[in-house]
Amino acid sequence: MPIVEARGLTKVFRRPDKGSGLGGAVKHLFARRYSDKVAVDHVDLSIEAGEAVAYVGPNGAGKSTTVKLLSGILVPTSGEVRINGLHPQRDRNTVAYQIGVLFGQRTQLWWDLPVSESLAVLRDIYGVDHATYRKRLARFDEVLELGEILPVIGRKLSLGQRMRADLAAALVHGPQVVYLDEPTIGLDLAVKDRVREFFRSLRDEGTTVMLTSHDLADIEGFCRRLVIIDQGRIIFDGDLEGVKDTFARERILHVETARPLPLEAVRAALPGAEINIEETPLRYAVRFDRFVMTAGQVVTVLATLTELVDFRVDEPSIEDVIRRVYSGDLVLPR
Amino acid sequence: MRLYLRLLGAHFRSMMEYETDFLILAAATVLMQVVNIVFLSALFAKVPVLNGWTFWSVLMMFGAVALAEGVGSLFFDGMWSLAWQINRGELDYFLVRPYPVALQVSSAALGINGLSNIVTGGLMIAAGLAHSAVDWTPWRVALAVLLLLSSVVIKVSINLATNAVCFWLNSPSPMFAFAMHQVGDLARFPLSIYPVALKAVLGVVLPFAFISFFPIAYLLDTGSSQWVGLLTPVAAVYCAAVAALIFRRGLRRYESAGN
């Protein structure tokens, strides 16, 4: 049985149509007009225990709304959610022990308390015993270096410190399912790396993780399953590697040579590859399909034709692929 | 209970950082009660008895209202920021914790001025009682405590219910609840002086009269329908249930806030 299951999940927000300025506001008092915005549109999703899922999409695609529906914060307009077979609103208390939620844009720490106190309050809310709590804290400290920020008052935390503390806060009760909504937003690279490492350790311990991000570097090397949402609809749900194999077959070999390349000879030796001359003299880019030839083969061919000074292989990131999906360039199979 | 005090206590520290604010607010609250008493004595200098109510018995009603308000702001002040919390999407994390959402809302602030209301209210009640001819038996003392507790529950429930209306109003400020709170000020005077419509409002729709008038009429044996005062605990249970229902219904409409 899937641990998280959504069927036909739909959320429609009703927004008042107010004209601009004061006039519009007054008019709205007398003639109320609303427009419906469909934020999440018939989403079906099922996540197995221990699975790590990336949930990506452009801004305003409905990522956060989905997370709020899956955690019982919002009541769906239609469709339903089950967490371990439980209804997130009707069984709110029971579900609360099983899920952990982090909204990167919002903290759950108490503004006026030191981090250690905030965490202790949460420990008491969840009724975590002291021994377990100490063990978890020690583990958070290992990866997140929590120790140094425990005495800091909530409002005095830097963004990176806050995010690390919030991660600990979301996991204090050892939830089975964790939703991470934009958990690396605004962080500098060093902190991002640390946080990403923490995600991996979570996954390796068997926690079910749903990671929402528009930083695709967060998901590479973290999860195998990729779900893409756009305008409230899921447009892809499948294997991350599969997407790369299907749509990121292309590799580019950048070479620097001692003497000019005999382009005709190269083209004859590497049918299917495309050779471009780059702006700097004696630099070339060879574009090829990695299922047709290997980078090794390309290098060998070039080395027989001229003397190579330097080379480097670029592979497209999943980011490029997804960007092309958003822009309608690529249509992924469902 | 212990956890609730802990949640409240989280705001105590910041409160203490603004010591002058606290002192000014406390002084203002006491001043307001003093003005009330001055007004009351001026009134009773002209009319010695108001529908069977003396200065001291009306003072007790003022005291009961102040006490209930004081408890409401000292322990449940967060309710008054519900509108703002809804508007800002602050309930998100409350909704994923295994603790009643209403209590997380009400513990989100600590109204330290409630303390001076509790003290002045308590003093007013004590002064009123000292001038009354109540025959104190243990049973009557217990009943008085129960009535007082019920009156506090009613005030807090009305606060919750009227603030929860914000789930429908989408307003970022507690205007509706504040307006209703003002209506509650009418309950400082004997209900019997008001026209029928107002009696119905204060006795049934927004039962502010159960905070002060009915229980005190029963305790002091004043007025014509003292037995109604015995219904105060029933009114308290009813108010709490209705408030909880409105809040739960409202929570289903909660829309969080966009990022």
Image (cartoon, helix red, strand yellow):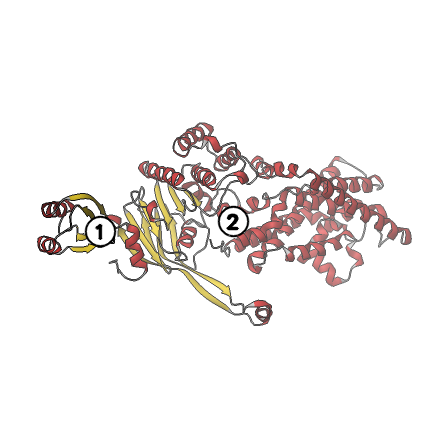
User: Given the image, what chain letter belongs to the residue carrying mark 2?
Assistant: B
According to the image, label 1 marks what residue? Answer: A281
Quarter occupied by the C terminus of chain A: bottom left
Q: Is residue B60 visible?
A: no
Q: Residue B91, which numbered label?
A: 2
Q: Is residue A317 visible?
A: yes
Give the image location of residue A279, x and y in percent.
Answer: 25, 54
Of A110 and B82, nearer the camera is: A110
Residue B201 figure quarter: bottom right
Give the image location of residue A34, x and y in percent.
Answer: 50, 68
Q: Amino acid at mark 2?
A: Leu
Residue at the spot 79% in from the left edge and 42% down from the top edge: B124
Q: Residue furthest top?
A: A131
Instruction: Say left or right for A295 vs B246.
Output: left
User: Given the image, what chain letter belongs to the residue carrying mark 1?
Assistant: A
Looking at the image, residue B56 lies above or below residue A124: below
Q: Amino acid at mark 1?
A: Pro
